[in-house]
Image (tube, rainbow, N blue to C red):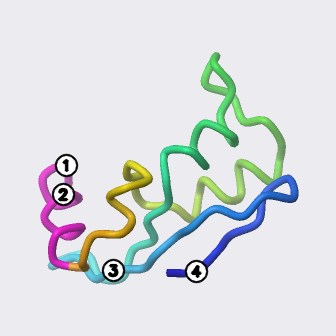
Amino acid sequence: MEILRFNNTGYPFRNIILPNIGEVTLATTTLNSKIINEDGSYTSENARLIDEKIYYFVDDNEMLFCDKALTDIVSQIS
């Protein structure tokens, strides 16, 4: 797990391999709530750039799951 900094706060992210897609980046819903306003717009240009790199946002506790469990979660929505 690595840390992405946004507005002086660190948020965890991970890369996993999805079948038929390849490597994708996952981050937490907490980060998502910081980069997206309530109206669905980005909080800044930097927020937009970060969002474009994230494939899917998982609950904070799910970030601790093993790669297989995360793959199963994300594969259900793909």
* Mark 4–mark 3 distance (CA, rounded to whole Å): 12 Å
Q: Secondary structure at mark 4?
A: strand
Element at label 2 = helix
- Residue picked out by circle 1: 77
Q: Secondary structure at mark 1?
A: helix
Is 1 displayed left or right of 35 in the figure?
left
Q: Position of residue 33 (x, y in %)?
A: 60, 36
Disc sitting over residue 73 in the figure:
2
- Marks 1 and 2 sit apart, C-alpha to C-alpha, by 7 Å
**Are dots 1 and 3 in contact, CB under 8 Å?**
no
Query: Residue at the spot x=32%, y=58% of the render?
Result: 62
Using the numbered discs, state the Cα–Cα distance from disc 2 to disc 3 in whole angstroms: 12 Å
The amino acid type, in three-letter code, at marker 2 is: Ile
Q: Which residues are magenta?
A: 68-78
Residue 72: give x, y in percent of width and height.
13, 64
Nearest the eye: 44 or 71: 71
